[in-house]
Image (tube, rainbow, N blue to C red):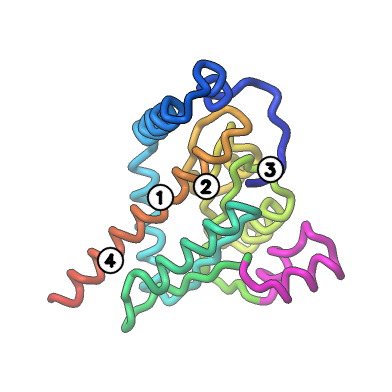
């Protein structure tokens, strides 16, 4: 969960206020996730998959970034795409920049936390690489700095956001947005993980089809 301020009663607040019974809350939570799923832009997800496949074809790297729960999602995405796809001959070169504690703490200590992803991209990003930025609020300074850098280099950027999307939604080339009120970190991060598993499942099927030909 990222830091942030919640000023309005969101759907989870309303659900708990209506009935504190845990079973009722669980049923309502699942129903809310189903509603959010029905609002997702399947075409945007399809475009995301196409970008990943194109990056694979040209041997480009796919960088994932995020804070808190979104950092865990970044790690999960990198795992499912690079290893879970089972692609060996033509791998998906997915990397999470949220994983190396030594690098992150060194940059944070020497240059400030806002630069933990920017500094890594400055030494790692090459022409044609993709950047996937994950942020529920869409306003994390370190994520925005990294996206700004990638865009200045001419690299493609994808944003996974929630709430109103923040600045990130407006900056990226492709937006995968989960529309919620502020503070609904759980549902937003749940949907981001659904994106991960949906994309991963498609890539597995694609690789299987290639191997069968």
Q: Residue at x 24, y 65 (%)?
A: 206
Which disc, if any, is residue 204? 4
Whichever of labels 4 and 3 marks the residue nearer the N terminus, that label is 3
Identify the mark nearer the N-term, 3 or 2: 3
Residue 116 in magenta stretch: yes
Q: Which mark is residue 195?
A: 1
Characterize the local packing of mark 4: few (<14), some (14-19) or many (20 or more) Cα atoms within 10 angstroms.
some
- The single residue placed furthest to the bottom in the displayed view is 89
Query: Between residues 147 and 143, which one lies in front from this camera angle?
Result: 143
The residue at the far left in this view is 213
Relative image position of residue 34 (x, y in whole percent)? 36, 33
Is the residue under label 2 in contact with that under label 3 (CB below 8 Å)? no
| Near-viewer residue (47 or 42) | 42
Marks 3/2: CA distance? 12 Å
Q: Give the structural element (helix, strand or loop) at label 1.
A: helix
Q: Earlier in the sequence, mark 2 or mark 4?
A: 2
Residue at label 3?
139
Lower position in the chain sequence, tag 3 or tag 1: 3
Mark 1 and mark 2 lie on one chain; the one further toward the N terminus is 2
> Is 134 on the left or on the right of 44, as rendered?
right
> Which tag is nearer the camera, tag 4 or tag 3?
4
* Residue wearing tag 2: 160
Q: Which residues are magenta?
A: 99-123
């Amino acid at each position: 969960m990222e830091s942030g301020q919640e000023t309005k009663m969101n759907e989870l607040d309303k659900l708990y206020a209506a009935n504190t019974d845990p079973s009722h809350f669980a049923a309502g939570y699942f129903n809310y996730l189903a509603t959010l799923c029905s609002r997702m832009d399947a075409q945007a997800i399809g475009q995301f998959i196409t970008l990943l496949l194109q990056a694979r074809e040209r041997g480009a790297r796919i960088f994932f970034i995020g804070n808190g729960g979104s950092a865990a999602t970044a790690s999960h995405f990198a795992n499912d795409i690079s290893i879970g796809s089972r692609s060996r001959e033509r791998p998906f070169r997915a990397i999470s920049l949220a994983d190396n504690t030594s690098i992150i703490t060194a940059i944070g200590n020497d240059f400030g936390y806002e630069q933990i992803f920017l500094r890594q991209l400055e030494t790692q990003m090459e022409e044609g690489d993709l950047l996937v930025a994950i942020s529920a609020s869409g306003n994390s300074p370190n994520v925005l700095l990294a996206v700004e850098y990638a865009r200045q280099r001419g690299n493609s950027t994808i944003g996974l956001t929630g709430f109103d999307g923040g600045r990130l939604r407006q900056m990226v080339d492709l937006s995968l947005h989960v529309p919620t009120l502020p503070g609904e970190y759980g549902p937003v991060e749940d949907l981001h993980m659904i994106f991960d598993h949906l994309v991963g499942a498609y890539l597995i099927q694609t690789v299987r089809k290639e191997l069968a030909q």
